[in-house]
Image: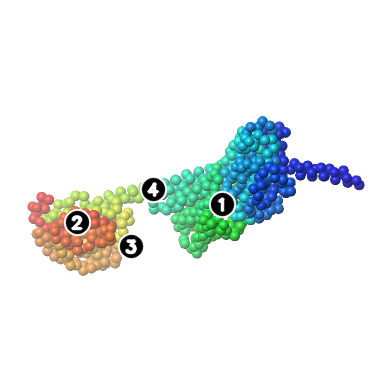
Amino acid sequence: MNLRPLALLFFALFAGALLHAQEFDLANSHSPVLSLDGLWRFHTGDDPAWSSAEFDDSTWELLRSDENWAEQGHVGYSGIAWYRFKVDLPAGMNKVSLSLPYILTSYQVYANGHLIGSFGTMPPHAVPFWGGGWFHSYLLPSAVGSQQNVEIAIRVWHWPGWSDDFGGGPSDGGALIGDQDTIERRDSVSSRAHHWDLSSTMILALLQTLAAIGALSLFLLRRSEKEYLWFGLMMFVSAAVGWFTLSFAFNVWDVLVSGPVQDSLSLVGVSIAEAGFYVYLLKGRRTLLFKIAVACILLILLYVSVQSYSILDPTFQTGMSANSAGLLETVLQLPLDVWILSLLFTRARENSLDARLLLAPVALQVLAQLFQGAAIITYNLGLQDRLGYNIVLIYYPFHIELLQVADALFLLAVLAILIYRFTRTLNQEQQYEAEFVAARSVQQLLIPAERPETPGLLVESEYLPAREVGGDFFQVIPHKSDGSTLIVIGDVAGKGLQAAMLVAHIAGVLLNEASHSSDPERILGALNSCLCERNHAMATCIALCIARGGSAVLVNAGHLPPYLNSAELPMEGALPLGAIAGMEFPVLRFQLNEGDSLTFMTDGIAEAKDTRGELFGFERVGEMLRTHVTALELARAAQVFGQEDDITVLTVSRVSTQRSLLN
């Protein structure tokens, strides 16, 4: 068999490839632009002479322009390398632009030895940059563009931090040269296409931003409900990650700065906010698993800090590849994910509506994160190239990724939960308000708005509740049948609505008993019996009956003894109402002479506290009573000093019958 014709044909094709592989002819093209996809001359190392048009690069190897150099035999190479190719330009083309695809990491572009553009910074002060879109265009100077033959040289520096995982140089095709206006239109279309591909990321970031604003606004209205705060922070950080990702389509970022910032937001910030959110939303306990999850978050923070150190010392390297770093991040995030899923599952079994709504979206989120981490690692290892870095569910009209769908479902579920909780809380507050109104109306029966006629006695009172409805109560009940006056003053345990409802219960018993008798012992006995029937219901109380002639019977159930003039009456101590059923309370009998004054008060007076923590105290009470202050003056003095509890002051003075009627 004669092989000479085949050999001659092979030689002709091979020689043609050697002669024209690195040369592109725009002069004979029927289009204003020419694709530069093909074979470019390539050489590692650095020499300024390699930018010259006269330099002979025929001994350089040929590499494809749509694959990085690691895929073509230069695995792990970092530092400087050069690409070269020739272009034949048509005569009369005034404005010529060169458009290059994304090239790792930094580079300079020369045309016939003239520097026409650059991306990033080159040695000796090289800093890795990335971002700015798919293509970058450079206008050839008129002196170069008017020449028919142009030698393009690209000096590339590849960052050592990426060399183990990514090859340097161009990784995709699409390089063009030709008419400037045409290339600018192509770049504009390409930019819009890039932004359209990122529209799902933008929409999700916008929704997360609005959710953050809404949640933080709800927190301002409900400061006690911290789940609004933590969800707002989680959405704010998640939105920041999305906007930061979008910024790479518009801006060029320093990798040494953007990398730690992005990791801090996505790995540390989101994780901390997630943990806080579930602790407050579902009352998550700080179990051993939770503590392990927190420890892992701290390890991620340490890892990010080590990365950040390279900002100050670019020569510092962790020695960890991107695949190893990605695997480490995935493993360190797992304990938090497991804790969240176990908490949701436990609360769902306890019939928590919030947990049931969140269980499926959160499970999908965790699985999507694991799948994406696996996709990134396997893609970098060359085990798959179909999924790439992300699992895309929809490619048209724009990309929608699995993780984005999971995040959107989670966002909708949490918003539904928070709106439901807010509405439920609002309804509860309206119900509480109605109960408060009812409690206030009942309490008015025990806090007389008008002073009854008490012949021979001058009664003054001042009541200052610490809340809208307080736990103090008093009653002045004159008995016309015998001319005696019954005075009851007390303080129930607790504050707010619960205390007010107990006061309302006491109201019925007190008024019912007082309608039959003015005996203080009988009154307190009845009150003690009704409180003993209620679990954990107690109140201090003191009852006084003053006869027409001034003889007084005082019975005390754990309340502060009154002051006679400026001295405290000596009384035995006693347990409060509701402590022991059938208990007998100490009785004190004395004579209230004309001109004498009794002062009753609740513990809100003595326990008033100033900003330094000093108590108002009984000594100050005695000093003020020696100056014959009124009930109003004593109550207001304690309030100004620093009120912390309900304040009630009631004074009873024995005067002539004529004077009491005049007052």
Q: Which one is in front in this view, the residue at disc 3 or the one at disc 4?
A: 4
Up the image or down, 295 lies above or below 463; here it is below
Element under label 1? Answer: loop
Q: Which mark is residue 125?
A: 1
Query: What residue would you read off at disc 3?
Result: 536
Residue that sits furthest to the right in the current view: 1
- Separation of residues labelled 1 and 2 (CA atoms): 77 Å
Q: Which one is in front in this view, the residue at disc 3 or the one at disc 1?
A: 1
Contact, mark 3 vs mark 4 (Cβ under 8 Å): no
Name which residue type carries label 3.
Answer: His
Q: Position of residue 336 (x, y in %)?
A: 52, 58
Residue under the point 72% across and 41% down: 23
Q: Earlier in the sequence, mark 1 or mark 2?
A: 1
Residue that sits furthest to the top in the current view: 92
Element under label 4? Answer: helix
Residue under the point 65% across and 34% down: 146
Q: Which one is in front in this view, the residue at disc 1 or the one at disc 2?
A: 1
Q: Residues within 10 Å of mark 1 (few under 14, many from 20)?
A: few
Q: Position of residue 386 (x, y in %)?
A: 66, 48
Query: What residue would you read off at disc 4?
Result: 221
Q: Which mark is residue 634?
A: 2
